[in-house]
């Protein structure tokens, strides 16, 4: 039950954040871009529980191990 409440809380906080950003937008010409971005993010937030979250970090480090060492930039 904790995972469901965490998921609902993240969606609710995202919607509140978008509402605040909408209120402080200087012009209405940015409204379509905000709606596009917020819609895509809302889809990702809604989709993530069925996929077990988006574990980008674990996937990317696993893929980097297979790259040849000459391709990896070193500082």
Image (cartoon, grey):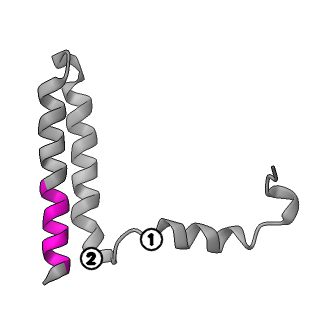
- Asked if 75 appears above or below 70 in the picture, the reply is above
Reply yes or no: does residue 5 show up in magenta: yes
Q: Is residue 40 left or right of residue 64?
A: left
Q: Position of residue 53 (x, y in %)?
A: 34, 72
Q: Is residue 23 left or right of residue 71?
A: left
Q: Is residue 19 left or right of residue 62?
A: left
Q: Nearer the viewer, residue 54 or 5?
A: 5
Q: Is residue 58 left or right of residue 69?
A: left
What secondary structure do most residues of the magenta stretch adopt? helix
Say the numbered circle drawn on residue 50.
Answer: 2
What residue is shown with label 1?
Answer: 55
Residue at x-position 13% and y-position 73%: 5
Query: Is label 2 in a helix, a strand or a loop?
Result: helix
Q: Position of residue 55 (x, y in %)?
A: 45, 71
CA gap, disc 1 to disc 2?
13 Å
Query: Is label 1 in a helix, a strand or a loop?
Result: loop
Residue at x-position 54% and y-position 73%: 58
Q: Position of residue 8 (x, y in %)?
A: 13, 66
- Asked if 53 appears above or below 42 in the picture, the reply is below
Q: Position of residue 46 (x, y in %)?
A: 21, 64
Residue at x-position 11% and y-position 27%: 23
Say few, some or many: other residues with alpha carbon within 10 Å of mark 1 (under 14 / 14 to 19 / 20 or more).
few
Instruction: Give the quarter of the figure containing the N terminus.
Output: bottom left
- Magenta span of residues: 3-12
Say few, some or many: other residues with alpha carbon within 10 Å of mark 2 (under 14 / 14 to 19 / 20 or more).
few
Residue at x-position 29% and y-position 68%: 48
User: Can you tell which quarter of the image residue 31 is in?
Assistant: top left
Q: Nearer the viewer, residue 13 or 54?
A: 13
């Amino acid at each position: 039950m904790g995972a469901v409440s965490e998921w609902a809380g993240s969606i609710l906080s995202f919607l509140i954040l978008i509402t605040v950003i909408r209120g402080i937008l200087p012009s209405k010409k940015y409204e379509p871009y905000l709606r596009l971005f917020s819609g895509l993010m809302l889809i990702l937030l809604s989709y993530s529980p069925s996929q077990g979250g988006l574990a980008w970090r674990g996937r990317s480090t696993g893929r980097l191990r297979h790259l040849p060492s000459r391709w990896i930039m070193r500082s």
